[in-house]
Image (tube, rainbow, N blue to C red):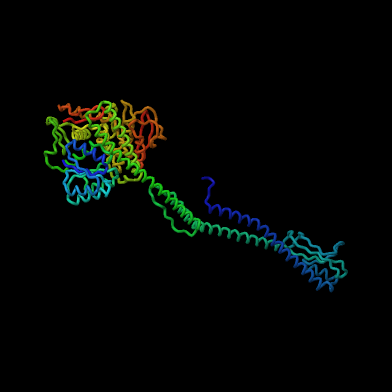
């Protein structure tokens, strides 16, 4: 997958690029409005990450410009401003998703996957297979050896999150924030995440699935397949 | 507000008092003055009569004339002079009136008549002052009535004029009362002819404007500060996430990163919460729509269920009907999640958290140890019972969210349980 990251904060851009390349995503960067304009004109990207507070121009204008050229790339807006207005405007102007800073890299990757998949109607891409486990994305169901699993909404989200960031260490903090969504001040502690992980593992094991969720000591969890 | 009265009433009252006092004092004075004026007139008339008699009749009088004169003229009697009556003498006496059959007051002038007959007579001219008395009394009554009517009329007129005069003041007062920094509207005052009120209006407008300006500046500063924080926070978080990917980390290093990440999470959440509070206070979440409260609750409870289970806390709803409320989704979710997580956080293992729904209200109860201090309960960052993970803002946010939705949130301690009641 080819991705363009439009972000003026260099260290942040570098971190994101490193993480994404580890997941097999080829990442290009643009640090100014002008640079971003050039790159989007020259290439087609599968996904564009757009920081709204760009120097040299308003990110929303760039968004508008990109859409007006008929470019159908998936666009995720990144911004420090969490105004409802900004969010609505961004989505109205054609953004596919909106992520506020600070975000977990794992969360970003999960959103990229979600956004890219949404526009794919190719059936084969919508079912993830990890050995005996299959995950049906549009239906939001999972099955082991063909037998469907009874997962709660949170458990399914957790499974998707882990598999989306496979072979990466996902911190408990990232999991907690992913599961609690927009709700502020939620519990970010071992117990909460541990409880959900435990339940998920139990259900997978009961259905005969191997344990692919590794506990990384002191840090979090990792989907190993 | 005992003892406080309207200014116009006070001045009216004082002036009316003064006027009444003046009337009360002047009435007897006027009476006395009028009386004396009349008496002077009476005396002058008596003198004229006496002088006229002396001039016209004194020389021609005979002793026989005296008897006839006295018969026909009771008010001008000729009598023998007493020894010592050498000069004219005034007196006021009561005389029996044969017609009225009672004693009546008279003014009497006794004048010696040396030129009459043998010079041993005096003239007693007298005038009844009864009529005069009645007349004066009547005049005083008239005066009193007129004065009273004038005063009354003046009072009523002044009252009306005052009402109109003071209207701009009361208008200004009402506008000042209604002024609300959060609504951000500068009151506008209609022009007035009264100098003091004009000055008052101008000063009030200036005060409101400068208050509003400083309020907005503070809000902006606060929001900008929070937003500025987001970028370095973002950099830090990304670095930490990357660091965690390193496979060569030792146990100690992992623990360190974990602590950093946790702490960091709190920091990020705190910042987000502060922003949320400021947005709620700015009225950002104003759109309301009909929502099924039970549905939202169930969703949240499902989500929190695993956590409740690990601490062996029973978490449930006590109602299966759907309760519909008019609410902003974001505010409702915020309110519910903050109350529920607060309840969970402060319930000992083995305890219960129970939500009871009824029309118009919702109770969230959790088992506890002892009543909480209601004074500080909803304050931001109030010290006291605060679990480590909390940012100290949870209940403050819940309360602001409730208030912004037009609901009330109250706490009570009952039967060994903390109960937060929310009324719609």
Residue B388 location, quadrant: top left
Question: Is any part of residue B322 visible from this angle?
Answer: no
Question: Is any part of residue A119 visible from this angle?
Answer: yes
Looking at the picture, how far across and down is residue B383, in whole percent?
A: 40, 33
Looking at the picture, how far across and down is residue B281, in whole percent?
A: 36, 43
Residue placed most toward the observer, B401 or A168: A168
Q: Is residue A157 above or below residue B279?
A: above
Looking at the picture, how far across and down is residue B129, in whole percent?
A: 72, 62
Residue placed most toward the observer, B249 or B93: B249
Q: How many marks?
A: 0
Residue placed most toward the observer, A148 or A43: A43
Residue placed most toward the observer, B94 or B156: B156
The residue located at (34%, 45%) in the rendering is B283
Query: Left or right of B38: which side holds B339?
Result: left
Query: Left or right of B314: which side holds B162?
Result: right
Residue B45 location, quadrant: bottom right
Q: Is residue B65 above or below residue A106?
A: below
The residue located at (39%, 37%) in the rendering is B379
The residue located at (36%, 35%) in the rendering is B392
Q: Is residue A131 above or below residue B125?
A: above
Query: Left or right of B132: which side holds A85?
Result: left
Q: Residue furthest right?
A: B118
Q: In the rendered image, which quarter contains the C terminus of chain B? A: top left
């Amino acid at each position: 997958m080819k991705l363009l990251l439009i972000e003026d904060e260099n260290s942040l851009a570098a971190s994101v690029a490193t993480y994404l390349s580890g997941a097999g995503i080829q990442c290009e960067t643009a640090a100014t409005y002008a640079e971003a304009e050039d790159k989007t004109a020259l290439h087609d990207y599968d996904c564009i990450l757009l920081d709204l507070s760009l120097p040299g121009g308003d990110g929303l204008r760039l968004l508008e410009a990109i859409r007006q050229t008929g470019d159908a790339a998936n666009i995720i807006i990144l911004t420090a401003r969490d105004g409802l207005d900004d969010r609505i405007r961004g989505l109205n102007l054609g953004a596919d998703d909106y992520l506020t800073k600070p975000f977990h890299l794992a969360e970003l990757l999960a959103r990229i996957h979600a956004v890219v998949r949404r526009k794919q109607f190719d059936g084969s891409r919508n079912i993830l297979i990890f050995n005996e486990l299959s995950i049906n994305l549009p239906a939001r169901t999972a099955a082991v050896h063909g037998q469907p699993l009874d997962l709660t909404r949170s458990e399914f989200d957790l499974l998707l999150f882990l598999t989306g960031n496979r072979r990466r260490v996902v911190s408990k903090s990232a999991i907690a924030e992913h599961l609690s969504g927009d709700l502020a001040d939620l519990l970010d502690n071992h117990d909460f995440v541990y409880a959900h992980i435990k339940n998920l593992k139990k259900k997978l094991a009961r259905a005969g699935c191997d344990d692919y969720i590794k506990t990384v000591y002191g840090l979090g969890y990792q989907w190993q397949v | 507000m005992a003892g406080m009265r309207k200014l116009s009433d006070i001045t009216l009252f004082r002036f009316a008092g003064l006027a009444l006092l003046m009337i009360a004092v002047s009435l007897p004075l006027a009476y006395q003055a009028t009386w004396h004026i009349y008496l002077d007139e009476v005396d002058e008339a008596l003198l004229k009569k006496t002088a006229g008699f002396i001039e016209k009749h004194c020389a021609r009088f005979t002793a026989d004339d005296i008897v006839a004169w006295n018969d026909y003229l009771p008010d001008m009697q000729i009598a023998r002079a007493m020894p010592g009556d050498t000069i004219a003498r005034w007196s006021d006496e009561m005389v029996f009136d044969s017609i009225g059959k009672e004693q009546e007051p008279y003014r009497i002038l006794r004048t010696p008549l040396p030129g009459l007959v043998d010079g041993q007579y005096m003239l007693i001219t007298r005038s009844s002052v009864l009529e005069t008395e009645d007349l004066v009394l009547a005049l005083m009554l008239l005066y009193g009535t007129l004065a009273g009517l004038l005063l009354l009329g003046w009072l009523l007129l002044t009252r009306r004029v005052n009402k109109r005069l003071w209207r701009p003041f009361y208008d200004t007062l009402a506008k000042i009362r209604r002024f609300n920094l959060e609504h951000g509207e500068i009151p506008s005052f209609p022009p007035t002819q009264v100098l003091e009120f004009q000055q008052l209006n101008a000063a009030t407008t200036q005060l409101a404007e400068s208050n509003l300006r400083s309020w907005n500046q503070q809000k902006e500063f606060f929001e900008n500060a929070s937003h500025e924080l987001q970028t370095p926070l973002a950099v830090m978080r990304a670095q930490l996430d990357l660091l965690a990917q390193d496979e060569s980390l030792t146990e100690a290093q992992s623990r360190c990163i974990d602590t950093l990440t946790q702490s960091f999470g709190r920091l990020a959440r705190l910042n987000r919460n502060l922003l949320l509070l400021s947005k709620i206070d700015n009225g950002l979440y104003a759109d309301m729509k009909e929502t099924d409260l039970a549905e939202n609750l169930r969703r949240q409870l499902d989500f929190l269920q695993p956590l409740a289970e690990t601490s062996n806390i029973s978490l449930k709803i006590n109602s299966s009907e759907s309760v519909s409320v008019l609410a902003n989704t974001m505010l409702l979710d915020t309110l519910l999640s903050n109350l529920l997580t607060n309840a969970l956080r402060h319930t000992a293992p083995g305890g219960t958290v129970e939500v009871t729904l009824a029309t118009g209200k919702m109770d969230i109860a959790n088992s506890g140890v002892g009543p909480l201090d209601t004074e500080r309960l909803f304050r931001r960052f109030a010290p006291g019972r605060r679990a480590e993970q909390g940012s100290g803002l949870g209940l403050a946010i819940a309360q602001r969210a409730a208030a912004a939705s037009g609901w009330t949130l109250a706490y009570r301690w009952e039967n060994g349980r903390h109960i937060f009641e929310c009324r719609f």
